[in-house]
Amino acid sequence: MGKLDGKVVLLTGASSGLGKQQAIRMAAEGANLAICARTESKLAETAKICEEHGAEVLAMTVDIMDYDALSAFVAATADRFGTIDVLVNNAHTITVPAPFLEKPIEDLDLEMRSSLYAYWHLMKLCFPFLRDRPGAGASIINFASEAAVMGDAFYAPYAASKEAVRGLSRVVAREWGKYNIRVNTLCPNGMTDNISGGIDWMEPATREHIEKSFVNNPFGRAGDPYEDVAPVAVFLASDDSRWITGQNIHADGGGLINA
């Protein structure tokens, strides 16, 4: 038996990176999946792997900054599966890291729309299907970031948007507990294909800063998206996390240790 047998998981940003590895891991744990991303060919690859693990998969090309597209995605998920047990707000468009003085307001707008606003919309759109689920109820997992918690240099728009996500998630956790919905945020450390492929062209100082941030933990290595981060998302999606809500979980190898 898998930890997610019979659950329907709606997960954004599944064409690559952490989203892809979460989708595959959740499929292996018995979930059926509604996944979306902007790149159709990559999304189809993720869907194929998940189906090979036995999952039923709905894959749709969606721009999460488009409300109508989000609404259509949620409606299609409900039509296909009848319900939604888990919402994973994973997708986020990150702008090029640079000092705050060099960051235009357009970068902040883009990052807020691709995370905070999208997460806001999806939580509301999914609510009618998440509410009052029996037993352990439903789960919402909103991705945050240690870079925001720590105030990491070069990440002003990213930090602002991700900390806003944490604040929103705490409020919704308080308000929706009565509907048997738990809401948690997850701060991951995982060296994804997106990150490793995206830093090669950056300025040397920026690239070095980013590379060091991924190994600045007691283990001295970057986390593996499938082996280290995805199992934590599976836990938060599963009934085993039934008594955890309003919390921020660090799947970062101890990159942030405090009381």
Image (tube, rainbow, N blue to C red):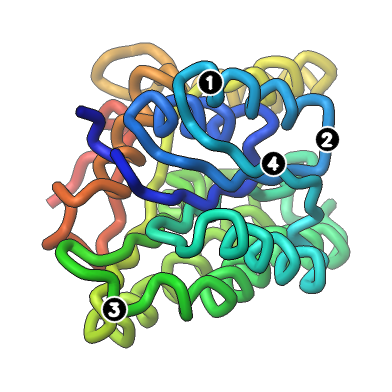
Q: Secondary structure at mark 3?
A: loop
Question: Would residue 96 be found to the left or right of residue 88 on screen?
Answer: right
- Graded by Cα atoms within 10 Å as few (under 14), some (14 to 19) or many (20 or more), the crowding at tag 3 reads some
> How many numbered marks, from 0 up?
4
Question: Would residue 5 be found to the left or right of residue 121 on screen?
Answer: left
Vertical comparison of 143 with 129: above or below? above
Instruction: Please give the label number shown on residue 132.
Output: 3
Q: CA distance from mark 2 to mark 1?
A: 20 Å
Instruction: Please give the label number shown on residue 191.
Output: 1
Vertical comparison of 125 with 77: above or below? below
- Give the foreground label among 2 and 4: 4
Residue sitting at x 52%, y 71%: 126
Q: Position of residue 145 (x, y in %)?
A: 47, 48
The earlier-in-sequence mark between 4 and 3 is 4
According to the picture, the residue beneath numbered tag 4 turns out to be: 59
Question: Would residue 130 be found to the left or right of residue 50 on screen?
Answer: left
Q: CA distance from mark 4 to mark 3?
A: 26 Å
Residue sitting at x 38%, y 30%: 229
For the residue marked with disc 1, what is the amino acid?
A: Met
According to the picture, the residue beneath numbered tag 2 turns out to be: 39
Q: Position of residue 141 (x, y in %)?
A: 41, 55
